[in-house]
Amino acid sequence: METLEAVIVEHPFFRGLREEYVALIAGCASNVRFAPSQYLFHEGEIANRFFLVRRGLVSLEIFVPGRGPASIQTVGEQEVIGWGWMVPPYRWRYTARALEITRAVAFDALCMRRICDADHDLGYELMLRFAGIISHRLQATRLQLMDIYSLSA
Amino acid sequence: MNDFHADPMFPLLYSVRQRVRENDDTFTLELEPSAGEMLPAFQAGQFNMLYVYGVGEIPISVSGDPSKPYRLIHTTRAVGTVTRSMAELRENDRLGVRGPYGSHWPMESVTGSDLVLVGGGIGLAPLRPAIYHIMANREKFGRVVLLYGARTQEDMLYRRELEQWRSRFDLEVYVTVDRATGSWHGAVGVVTTMIPHAPFDPLDSVAFVCGPEVMMRFTVQALQRRGVTSDRIYLSMERNMKCGAGFCGHCQFGPFFICRDGPVMRFDRIQDFFGKWEV
């Protein structure tokens, strides 16, 4: 049986993380599974977790009055969902809904903040990794805003 | 080849056999020779100059099957004077065609490699002949992955074929849209977001990329971050072409003419000019 530590260390997001850190954060982790259409979390709720997606596809959505939920992005295998847990006010800025059966590792936010506060080296390491994700998502969002497929050379 | 045909500026007469609307502003023309005489066979990635009589002439990549050169297929957007006129053509209407011109996807030299084809918007059209070639010679290539991004599902080209390609066991097709509309339940995000996790080995893959230049720029960056080297990335470039044969210089790009040295160019040969404001 695959341990959570093995799953964490194989996920691209945590690849290369020192062994003692992996053991530490594994203590905050649990295996989760979502059925199609099941919500991982809702916009406005307390961001009490983040997820390493192992299998499946998750839609990140913002509710538009009069129109309903609008999918702004999908996140799939080998990716990470959620950084609202890192920064106050610790609220989700969007809703996450599984589009297909999704298996993930969930990390408890309080537990993660506690170990990051206790060990700033680990906190910095995590911050660097999340900053990379945030940077790529920001760039992708800018390209979406540019409507790049309509542009000619 | 007769004397007329020896002149690269002389168009042959072709008739519209069919016009297919792909989406709101994009259409596909299927052409066949009007007088029996036809252009030489094209290779995947090359383009023809299409001339609407009395209106003007423009370059359009061939998007049909290279093994069926009798029937020329071109997909384009109705965005200018010539293409808008072209969008009005009906069955049996005639237009002039000369070509094929330019470089092509290096199908022979990439035999044995994995292939990653990345298309954005109408950029799927110049990739389609390469896909036909790959499917007809499937045993010659390793893993083949097609990544396609479109604005919405309604904007996608060749939707029926995309579904057919997705159903094959020897072709991996991943599609993403910028905006999820209607019944779309697939991936949302620009095509570059699929590259980090797409199932290909970066050390043994060759990438063919086609789409708007800004999309290709970020696609190249994503491929390089993944580990694909510049000499294994090919782009289909687009510039304002007039003669199509390297005479006029309209499409100059650094030391190259896109019509003659392109449109398909290996990235390491153009990386010093690519993305520059003026070259």
Image (cartoon, rainbow, N blue to C red):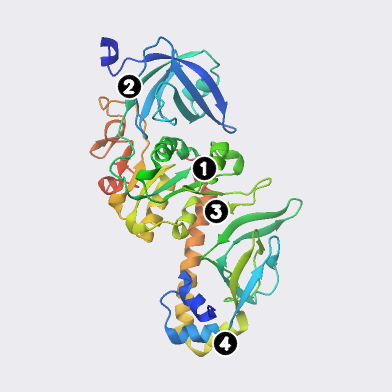
Q: Marks 1 and 2, how far apart in space?
A: 28 Å
Which residue lies at the image location 59% right of the left edge and 57% below the top edge? Answer: A73
In the picture of the structure, the residue carrying the numbered disc 2 is: B40
For label 4, the SS is: helix
For label 1, the SS is: helix
Please identify, in this view, whether the residue under mark 3 or under mark 2 is nearer the observer. Answer: 2
In the picture of the structure, the residue carrying the numbered disc 4 is: A114
Q: Amino acid at mark 3?
A: Gly
**In contact (CB < 8 Å): disc 3 and disc 4:** no
Which residue lies at the image location 55% right of the left edge and 61% below the top edge? Answer: A76
Does label 4 lie on the same chain as label 2?
Answer: no
**In contact (CB < 8 Å): disc 3 and disc 2:** no
In the picture of the structure, the residue carrying the numbered disc 3 is: B189
Can you say whether A80 is above or below B180 in the image? below
Chain designation of label 4? A
Of the 4 image quadrants, the one containing the N terminus of chain B is top left
Q: Amino acid at mark 1?
A: Trp
User: Residue B214: percent from the left, percent from the top?
Assistant: 42, 46
User: Residue A98: percent from the left, percent from the top?
Assistant: 65, 62
Q: Marks 3 and 4, how far apart in space?
A: 33 Å
Please identify, in this view, whether the residue under mark 2 or under mark 4 is nearer the observer. Answer: 2
In this view of the protein, can residue B96 be seen by the observer?
yes
In the picture of the structure, the residue carrying the numbered disc 1 is: B165
Q: Earlier in the sequence, mark 3 or mark 1?
A: 1
